[in-house]
Image: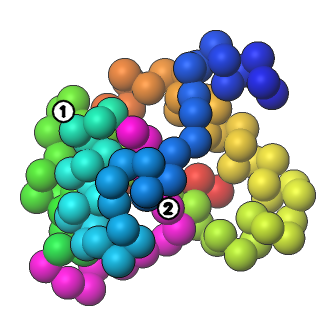
Amino acid sequence: MARVWGYLELRCVSFADLGLDPADSDLKVWDCCQAQEVLLITDNRNQKAADSLETTIRAKSTPTSLPVFTIGDARRLLTDGEYADRIVDRLLRYLLELNAVRGTGRLYLP
């Protein structure tokens, strides 16, 4: 797995690494991720406010925007190894073709 991360030049960053606070709005998080070319992986969120992630993606996404990767069932990811494997497999496929999925808005992981 380390070789794949190296090949894709991946690293994990936290909100603090990006100068963000977990309480920041989805709009601010999305803007920061786009500006710094950071992939956002999140659990399934919905459109409840004017600055929600879904509203932000619909309003601000361009053909070159990075997609947001959304895990369909984050709790299951932690308890079901087969489900976790499917998520990793799908995510790696997207990462290998990242330029082809720019501008898609949101991509769901199993």
The quadrant holding residue 58 is bottom left
Three-letter code for the amino acid on which mark 2 is drawn: Thr
* Mark carried by residue 63: 1
Q: Residue drawn at (65%, 70%), measured in percent from left and top?
A: 74
Residue 45 position, x and y percent, is 42, 74
Classify mark 2: residues with Cα within 10 Å, few (<14), some (14-19) or many (20+).
some
Q: Describe residue 71's horizontal placement relative to residue 77 as left or right.
A: left
Principal secondary structure, stretch drawn in magenta = loop
Regarding mark 2 in the picture, which secondary structure is present there? strand
Q: Nearer the viewer, residue 27 or 49?
A: 27
* Mark carried by residue 42: 2
Q: Describe residue 6's horizontal placement relative to residue 52 as left or right.
A: right
Q: Nearer the viewer, residue 21 or 10?
A: 21
Three-letter code for the amino acid on which mark 1 is drawn: Pro
- Can residue 49 be found in the magenta stretch? yes
Regarding mark 1 in the picture, which secondary structure is present there? loop
Kindly report which numbered mark, 2 or 1, lies closer to the viewer in this rendering: 2
Q: Describe residue 5's horizontal placement relative to residue 1 as left or right.
A: left
Relative vertical location of residue 34 with respect to residue 56 in this rendering, above or below: above
* Mark carried by residue 11: none
Of labels 2 and 1, earlier in sequence is: 2
Q: Which residues are magenta?
A: 38-50
The quadrant holding residue 52 is bottom left
Residue 51 position, x and y percent, is 17, 74
Query: For the view shown, which residue lies furthest in the top direction?
Result: 7
